[in-house]
Image (cartoon, helix red, strand yellow):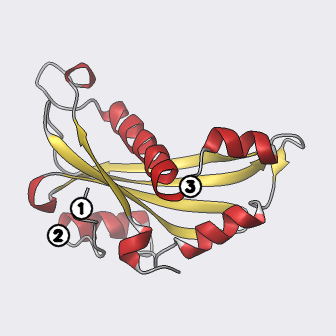
Amino acid sequence: MQPQSQAVLASKHFIRFSDCDPMGHLFNVKYLDYFLNAREDQVRDSHQLNMAILSKKYNWALLVGKHQIAYLNSALMNEQVIISSVIIDQSPKWIVVEYLMTGKNNEVKSFMWSHFVSFNSTKKTTAHVPEDIRSIIVENTIEKPAPDFDSRFMQLREGGIGYSIPGDV
């Protein structure tokens, strides 16, 4: 495992006009897009891993098994937010990624846990993560900040993130 500060990836984003309702709040469904797109970019930029290339090389992918998402404070049109992501649990056949969207003063807007399943696209079945990818996953997994999603919700609502989000994004 790496120190938490190196395992947590973060990037700045602006909430776009086209992603908001008439009151200027980010549509709930758009949080998914912001989180997943941010993670893809963060992994590519931090680890030089391109999921499209890995998919072809190994006939393998990480497929979404489920998302759990909670909304704590509204993300507003043209607001600058920081989206952080980190692996909080893993096994040879799956990973769980936590995403946080924060605003000024680390105010948590939303958080999501995504459970990804390792899948062999040739055999059309679950499979072990390729070993060289697995080593990166293991090195970049932090201790799970709460035992379950609802406990994490309460922790975040009370103001405790539980790990450092890089400040140089």
In the orientation shown, which residue stands out farthest toward the right? 123
Q: Mark 1 or mark 2: which comes first in sequence?
A: 2
The amino acid on which the numbered mark 3 sits, given as a three-letter code, is His
Task: Calculate the distance from the C-alpha at mark 1 to the C-alpha at mark 3.
Answer: 28 Å
Comparing 7 with 87, the one in front is 7
Residue drawn at x 90%, y 43% is 123
- Where residue 71 appears, x then y in whole percent? 26, 47
Relative side of 9 to 166, left or right: right
Q: Which residue is mark 2?
A: 158
Which residue is found at the position 26% from the left and 56% from the top? 169
Res 20 → quadrant: top left
Do residues under tags 1 and 3 come within 8 Å of each other at their CB atoms?
no
Measuring 55% from the left and 53% from the top, which residue is drawn there?
Answer: 48
Q: Which residue, given by chain and number where applicable, does mark 3 sit on?
A: 115
Lower sequence index among marks 1 and 3:
3
> 116 or 38: which is nearer to us?
38
Q: Position of residue 124 (x, y in %)?
A: 85, 41
Which of the numbered marks, if any, corresponds to residue 168? 1
Depth check, front residue: 60 or 66: 60
- The residue mark sitting in front, 1 or 3, is 1
Residue nearest the observer in this picture, 127 or 45: 45
